[in-house]
Amino acid sequence: MTEGGKGIAAIVAACTIWGLSALYYKLLDHVPPLEVLAHRTIWSFVFFAGVLIAQRRLTVLRQALSNWKDVAIVAFAALMISCNWFVFISSIQTGHAIEASMGYYTFPLASVLMGAIFFRERLGPAQAAAVALAAIAVVVLAAGLGVAPWIPIIVAATFALYGVAKKWLTVGPVVSVTAEVMLLSPIAAVLLWQAHHAGTGHYGTDIPTSLLLMFSGLLTGTPLILFSYAARRLTMATVGLLQYINPSLQFLCATLIFREVFSIWHAIAFGLIWTALAIYTTALWRQDRVARRVPPSV
């Protein structure tokens, strides 16, 4: 298999795991979302620390936390990803997986907007049109349902801001995520201690639940490593296109397995977002083709 083929296989596997993770969190709907989040944080730290130890790169963590500026960036990234995880877990457990999938569909467009705000990246006509259509979709859904679609807004915004923090860091994704969950682990440990002290903790109450909670570390770490492997071997256009596997599988889980209500307002909003993504992806694909045709400067 070629390097490109290996990259495609890796990113398809990563996005499939992310997309089907809704099924996993549905199995834990008897555990409060905050407790699930705390376990995900701690077991993710165990997983990533183990990876770095196996690679003999644990000392690289110092680079991610070398000064107060880096610590602040890592802390901000940790806050964003923990908020994203919490909202996603809560949405699955409370019957709002459709809104969560909409958030991940909207994320690429939110990232474009964040790039313009934080890095002064210019929006081309296609990008501007795509972002405008996504904004219209949010307004339509809010007007139709009579309430602001907070889940897709928070999911897209926190993940896009997480991406902003990642651009400010110079270390690789595995090291930075390890640093993030390391900072969050003491808070998670306190939350779990309080839950078990109050007699409401679920870890240790039965073997299936305990194993599922421990599995959250592997579920978090494996797709990230696969994605990092793929990103080094594929063009950004290919990565961007295949990432839609994730929200598409989430959407199918929500509608076909969880049987969540898909109203006419959801249909209109999703139609606008899918149109926006088609415009954005087509423009990205064309830019990638042009870039590959241009010979490198001497």
Image: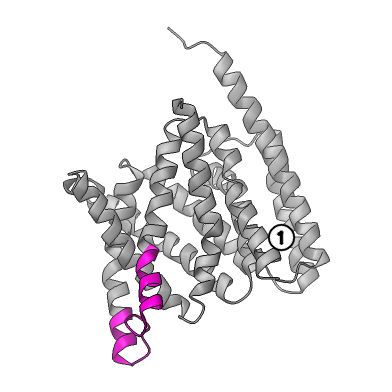
- Residue on which disc 1 sits: 138
State whether residue 68 appears in this view.
no
Give whichever of 58, 4 is nearer the camera: 4
Q: Position of residue 131 (x, y in %)?
A: 68, 47
Crowding near the residue tagged with mark 1, few <14, some 14–19, many ≥20 C-alpha atoms within 10 Å: many
Quarter of the image for the C terminus: give it: top left
Residue 32: x, y in percent?
46, 80
Could you tell whether 85 is left or right of 264 in the image? left
Q: Is residue 294 left or right of residue 80?
A: right
The range drawn in magenta is 191-216
Q: Answer whether residue 159 is magenta in the image.
A: no
Secondary element at tag 1: helix
Residue beneath the point at 42% across and 33% down: 232
Q: For residue 212: magenta?
A: yes
- Residue 144 vs 252, above or below: the answer is below
Q: Quadrant of residue 35?
A: bottom left
Q: Is residue 55 visible?
A: yes
Residue occupying image coordinates x 51% and y 35%? 8
Residue at the (21%, 43%) spot, across then down: 55
Q: Amino acid at mark 1?
A: Val
Q: Quadrant of residue 231?
A: top left
Q: Position of residue 38 (x, y in %)?
A: 36, 72
Residue 267 lies in what quarter of the image? Answer: bottom right
Q: How many marks?
A: 1
Tell me the chief SS of the magenta region: helix
User: Is residue 297 found left or right of 272 in the rendered image?
Assistant: left
Q: Is residue 4 left or right of residue 41?
A: right
Looking at the picture, tell me which residue is in the foreground, 282 or 233.
233
Residue at x 55% of width, y 47% of height? 111
Which of 269/28 is in front? Answer: 28
- Color style of the picture: one colour
